[in-house]
Amino acid sequence: MKILLVTMTDKLAEKLSALNPELEYCAAVVDNVESAKEILSSVGLSQVPLYPFRTLQKLVKTLEYDYVLLVQEKFYGIGIIKKLNVYGLPSNKLISFATLPTIGNWQTERHLRYYQEHAQEFEMFATGTSYTQTSIDIRRFKYKTFNFGTSSQDLYYSFQIAKSVIFTTINT
């Protein structure tokens, strides 16, 4: 799997240490190429070609990669995602650490894990699409409720969540 890495140079060694060491990088786009050279060399990735941010649009269109991996803080990450969308990068080719915890399965996974740890605190649950997520004010319910609703959640995942919650409730 070829990865085009997009990140700020700040804490680059830490960011790389969190990634699978077997990833194949076709290039890295950074804010400070000279500092990044030293960091990549120190972690054994001196062969990864480095480019400045100003070349991002050209690279997205010309390099051969499977995914663009955006390892970035939320503030900068959102701006870069908007640019990548403008550059024509399909959303299924982008993996963003800034937005990963808030999308579909990751959010559901976090909710299920939290619910499993605190199931005894809840008396009801809700699940469904974004209407469930944003339109139900669980604070107004008579019974303590957990809302599993997420954007674009389909019937299949709502059912799987309900099964998981019921199984968790039975076994606690």
Image: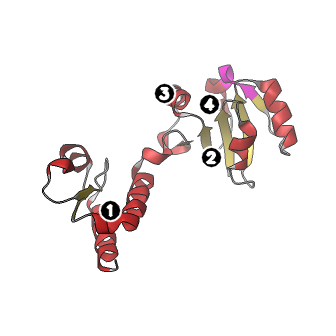
Q: CA distance from mark 2 to mark 3?
A: 19 Å
Do callouts 3 and 1 mark residues in contact (Cβ within 8 Å)? no
Say which label, 1 or 2, has the lower sequence index.
2
Q: Earlier in the sequence, mark 2 or mark 4?
A: 4
Numbered mark located on residue 157 in the image: 1
| Span of residues in magenta | 51-55
Q: Name the N-terminal-most of marks 4 and 3.
A: 4
Give the CA separation, mark 1 to mark 2. 27 Å
* Residue highlighted by disc 2: 66
Q: Residue furthest front?
A: 121
Examine the rendered structure and indicate whether residue 108 appears above or below residue 59.
below
The quadrant of the rendering that contains the C terminus is bottom left
Where disc 1 sits, the SS reads: helix
Task: Assess disc 2: are there few (<14), some (14-19) or many (≥20) residues with their C-alpha within 10 Å of its C-alpha.
Answer: some
Identify the residue under disc 3.
Answer: 82
Which amino acid is tagged 3? Lys
Classed neighbour count for the residue bearing mark 4: other residues with Cα under 10 Å, few (<14), some (14–19), many (≥20): few
Q: Is residue 151 left or right of residue 107?
A: left
User: How far from the left and from the top, in percent, is residue 118?
Assistant: 36, 64
Outermost residue on the left side: it is 142
